[in-house]
Image (spheres, rainbow, N blue to C red):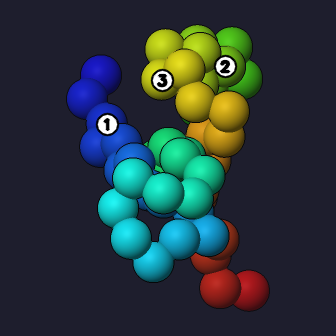
Amino acid sequence: MKRNIYFIDAFADTLFSGNPAAVLLLDKWLDKALMQSIAAENNLSETAFVVEEENK
């Protein structure tokens, strides 16, 4: 499985400052165990998984 992971510096205006975080944009939710494994692999205190909601 191939996924794009975006690494951001949250709460910062400059690179390599602020709080590092990983963000994954998903088409659908992954298995919880897989998401935990991805977060552990990135070794960052914050990893966010985002799925766009359908308009209701």
Secondary structure, mark 1, is loop
Quadrant where the C terminus is found in the figure: bottom right
Name the residue at 53% across, 71% down: 12
Q: Which residue is mark 1?
A: 3
Q: Quick one: 6 or 31, which is closer to the camera?
A: 6
First in sequence, mark 1 or 2: give its number: 1
Instruction: Answer whether residue 31 is visible to the viewer in this image.
Output: no
Residue 40 placement (x, y as % from top left): 59, 15
User: Marks 2 and 3: CB-CB under 8 Å?
Assistant: no
Q: The residue under label 3 is which amino acid type?
A: Asn
Give the distance between the C-alpha atoms of the residues marked 1 and 2, in whole angstroms. 15 Å
Please state which of residues 16 and 25 is positioned toward the viewer in this rendering: 16
Residue 42 is marked as: 3
Asked if one can make out residue 42 in the rendered structure from this viewpoint, the answer is yes
Q: Residues within 10 Å of mark 2 (few under 14, many from 20)?
A: few
Element class at badge 3: helix
Residue with the mark numbered 2? 36
Task: Name the residue: 29% across, 43% down.
Answer: 4
Q: Position of residue 50 (x, y in %)?
A: 59, 56
